[in-house]
Image: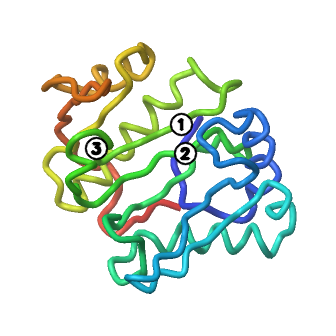
Amino acid sequence: MSQIVRPDPRYQSSYLEAHDEFGGVHRDGDGVWVVPAEEATGYAGYTFTRAGLEDATEFRRLVQVRRADELPESPRPDGHVPCTFLWVVDGEEYLGSIALRHELSDFLLEQGGHVGYSIRPSARRQGHARTALRQVLELAGEMGLERVLITCDEDNDASRATIEGAGGEYEDSRSGKRRYWVTTVPSDRPEGARIG
């Protein structure tokens, strides 16, 4: 059964397999993530490449960067907000990712929303996005968010069904994105229990 966990180095092999399966979609060339430095704000930026992530030390650095992004005090590019990055896994297999942005910038209010997710092609249409979204809605509720904005492309019927299945109420479409507000749900985790 799939679940969300915080990024962890133990998923390195499966993560790289999933990266190859995505075929570079949503990536910048060979960069898994490229966030440029900003001289004005002093943000150092970073680049991770597919080849570089085969090194265990470099993969641990990716995990550290992703986990640090949820901390309000972590440096980030201008306009970016704190974000909890989570991985969708089943046992030792990395299935995809889901992100919970803690607040909305002007851009996120228009198009990006609080939540974004992606499931590797071989794991789609098996309910993993639905399960991950339900768990993230619990986490959002624990963080004090009463409702979250989730968007999807106008032509993404699978994502639309996932969002509507979670109780998403359609507000409108902007720049090719459908915008839904979803009420967070009470958590069934014991008080103080954290996501792995």
Q: Is label 2 in a helix, a strand or a loop?
A: strand
Residue at left 76%, top 33%?
21
Residue bearing mark 3: 113
First along the sequence among labels 1 and 3: 3
Identified by mark 3, the residue type is Gly
Task: Give the left or right position of residue 190, taking residue 123 as reference.
Answer: left
Residue bearing mark 1: 118
Q: Is label 1 in a helix, a strand or a loop?
A: strand
Question: Quadrant of residue 133 in the image?
Answer: top left
Q: Tell me if residue 88 comes above or below residue 38 in the rendering.
A: above
Spatial distance from mark 2 to mark 3, Cα to Cα? 15 Å
Disc 1 + disc 2, Cβ < 8 Å: yes
Q: Tell me if residue 114 comes above or below residue 34 in the rendering.
A: above
Identified by mark 2, the residue type is Ser
Residue 160: x %, y % from top left: 35, 19
Which residue is at the front of the view, 189 or 138? 138
Residue at left 48%, top 31%?
129
First along the sequence among labels 2 and 3: 2
Residue bearing mark 2: 97
